[in-house]
Image (cartoon, grey):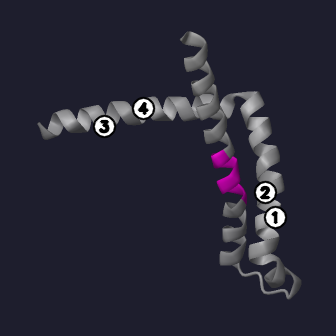
Amino acid sequence: MLQAVLVENRKMEQVSLQKVTAIVMNPGCRSTALRVALCVGSVLFVINHGSALISGQMSRDRWISAMLTYCVPFGVSLHGQHQGNQTQKKHLES
């Protein structure tokens, strides 16, 4: 039974990875997500790290955190676009 669950989980991971790759490789989705990440990420960067940047207190860990600040809106934008596309397809099919 455990082996069946592990096999099923592996299949789900492969499908999910294929979907993520397809979404990221879509030039329209990627372009929009990059613009969103640049705008939203910059606002978040200033809010979270602006004072440290101005005062020269940006450590290595803070720079890593700053880079992740841009990754979150990128991922959220991709997810939103994918969900929107899925919803639109369902409405067109019905």
Query: Reading the chain from its start, which is encountered first: label 3 or label 4?
Result: 3
Circle 1 residues within 10 Å: few <14, some 14–19, many ≥20: some
Query: Reading the chain from its start, which is encountered first: label 4 or label 1?
Result: 4
Q: Please state which amino acid type lies under the numbered disc 2.
A: Val
Badge 3 element: helix
Q: Residue at x 72, y 72 (%)?
A: 63
Residue at mark 3:
9
Residue at mark 1:
43
Give the image location of residue 15, x and y in percent.
Answer: 44, 29
Residue at mark 2:
40
- Looking at the picture, does residue 14 appear above or below residue 51? above
Circle 2 residues within 10 Å: few <14, some 14–19, many ≥20: some
What segment carries the magenta color? 70-76
Q: Which mark is residue 14?
A: 4
Magenta: main secondary structure: helix
Disc 3/disc 4 C-alpha distance (Å): 9 Å
Query: Reading the chain from its start, which is encountered first: label 2 or label 3?
Result: 3
- Choose mark 2 or mark 3, whichever is in front: 2
- Choose mark 4 or mark 2, whichever is in front: 2
- Choose mark 1 or mark 3, whichever is in front: 1
